[in-house]
Image (cartoon, coloured by chain):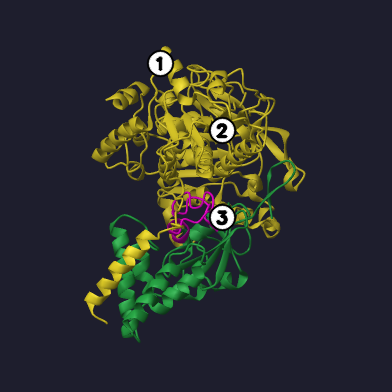
Amino acid sequence: MARCLYLGSFLFTKIVNTPRISMRVKTCLIKTWTPHSQGKTAKCSTFSNILIKINDMYSSSGKSWLLTSSDFYSLSEEKVIIHFINQDGIRTTTAVTEGQTLLDVVVNKNLDISGFGACEGTLACSTCHLIFDKTFYEKMEPTVDEEMDMLDLAYGLTKTSRLGCQVTVQKWMDGMTVQVPQEVRDAVGSKGNQ
Amino acid sequence: MSTHKAALCKVQILKLFLTSARCGRITRFHGVCGLSTSTPASSAKVCIVGGGPAGFYTAQHLVKTRTDVQVDIYERLPVPFGLVRFGVAPDHPEVKNVINTFTQTAQHARCSFHGNVRVGKDVTVEELQEAYHAVVLSYGAEGNRTMGVPGEDLAGVYSAKDFVGWYNGLPRNSELRPDLSCETAVILGQGNVALDVARILLSPVDILKKTDITQHALDALAESSVRRVLIVGRRGPLQVACTIKELREMVNLPGTRPEMEASEFEGIAETLKSLARPRKRLTELLLKAAIETPGEEELERRNRAERAWGFRFLRKPLEVLPSTDLIRAAGIRLAVNRLEGDGEGVRAVATGEVEDVECGLVISSIGYKSLLIDPAVPFDARKAIIPNTMGRVQQTAGLYCSGWVKRGPTGVIATTMNDSFDTARTLLQDIGKGTLDVSTVKPGSQGVSALLEKRGVKPVSFSDWEKIDSEETRRGEIKGKPREKMLDVGEMLQVARA
């Protein structure tokens, strides 16, 4: 049993450390093998202890391993999957915890969205403008005047637009896709609106 | 098996294995934080003229996208950030958060800031073009559109650009000493700058004294007799150029009440349903402030208010009327307009009627204007911009432009941000396609430094600015303000060299 566990945890860490494997797969793997608040098994807890120890080892030596320590410790919490599509149509999937704003997500996950969040979430610009699917948009808290005022100035405004700094991640947003206005350039080179 | 010791054992074995067979490290490129410190000899050297938002955003995009681009930003003043420092109102500190991004860019390994260098005087654009593979002009608009009416030179008449520069500590406006001893001030123009000026004139001093407004402006405003501000525009309520956030701030300004003529809003309410949401909400708020009967609480608040503000529409300045001693402004003569056409093509047409308004302070807020800084740069004097296609300056290879000098002086910081990213993309495209030749070795900042030294010009580096920054912050702390700006370039240079 000892040998099996050793091999298992070794393979596990190799898989999880491979960049090419998608974040979604890794998150599933990690979700399965980290302790949940109930139903902890001896196997799970030893496993996660090993992972925690390895991560700490790497963190303390200044190297980044798989995740930051805070990401790692919050693994036992439910993760919400959100997809971001940037100005060039490139899609990135993130697994985030509830309670942070979408601006926090873009900043913390270092997503490649140019010029996002210029005023750092103080309702003084419209650069964290995000477009939502109608079904998700309708479930959100209504917009307050101050947000609407800045949103009114956003480039590429739609009926399902919100400012990312005012939207907080919640469990029911699992699987949601958000996008920034896509850039269209016409022959003259001026920015168009799709 | 579940013992702590056994787990530790496994950890050691795993560690050995992983470190020896380590491959494919996940590296992340964190925004603008550059990781490499060595610049390859064949790197592209780009020079940016102007250290305001346009300059910084262009630099940010360039260094973030290609690892072989070195960017040098040249700025006329010893202090960076342009209108973010000198234009954004003191009571809008959140808008200035972009300075954090600019600071990151300036501290990037492949970016450097050179303040106290006047391009066009200390070094020419041609000399920059010889030293760099590409030069990006991002020097904004330091002039202003004049009303072109008699009396514009009387005491008491200022451009909004100078007035804003005065309360924001722009060195060249430090001696403005506007006379605030009159009761009525008239502002021509109805954009956000006009509303900023109105708000600063009427804000309670208790609010202003906690901002980074300059001390001399604060003192002058504390003594001000201005009690009524009229914000005058050529066209009607549907053409007002300000945005809703600024209008809401006026409506909610403590100690003030709105005072407008209901007759100027005839027929406006009926157009609401056909308007796009941003214009609709703006017009609704305007109507509410101008003609709606307020609730009891609001009525009481208005009755207690000692200061008043209001929009006046369909009025164009004809002449500033002098006082009896002919030295200062005592009033303004306005031509009354009517509107012709509809939708986007609405035009103001004179009716022949005139109206005189008594006032002692006239501030024209009808637009900034770019100026020519070097004869080698093509310039469209009519539009007051550098003629360009997608940021490429016409008829001049290796010369680009971004920001207000490229598009004209309108828009918020985010507009300039997108525009600067566009120019950076164009430049990078040209490098990629080979249209911009970066294969030759250029001296870059070393070449320019040699020239400047010969001419006795000492540039201010970003870490020198940080000394000025700490000193301003320190002086501000004593007074409970975020900073106390230095008003004199000589003083800035002294602190920078300390």
Which dot marks residue B453?
1
Q: Which residues are magenta?
A: A104-129
Which residue is identified by label 2?
A: B357
Q: CA distance from mark 2 to mark 3?
A: 26 Å
In the picture, measured across the screen, residue B43 lies left or right of residue A41, that is right
Q: Is residue B481 above or below residue B18?
A: above
Shade of chain B as shown in the rendered figure: yellow
Question: If you read the primary sequence from the N terminus, does the residue marked by circle 2 or circle 1 appear first?
Answer: 2
Task: Report the residue at 26% width, 82% height from top.
Answer: B2
| Kind of residue at disc 3 | Leu
In the rendered structure, which amino acid carries the disc numbered 2?
Val
| Label 2 secondary element | strand
Q: Nearer the viewer, residue B202 or A101?
A: A101
The quadrant where residue B476 appears: top left
Q: Residues within 10 Å of mark 3 (few under 14, many from 20)?
A: some
- Residue A119 painted magenta: yes
Secondary structure under the numbered disc 1 in the rendered image: helix
Circle nearer the viewer, 3 or 1: 1
B201, above or below A30, in the image: above
Whether residue A37 is visible here, answered yes or no, is no
Q: Amino acid at mark 1?
A: Glu
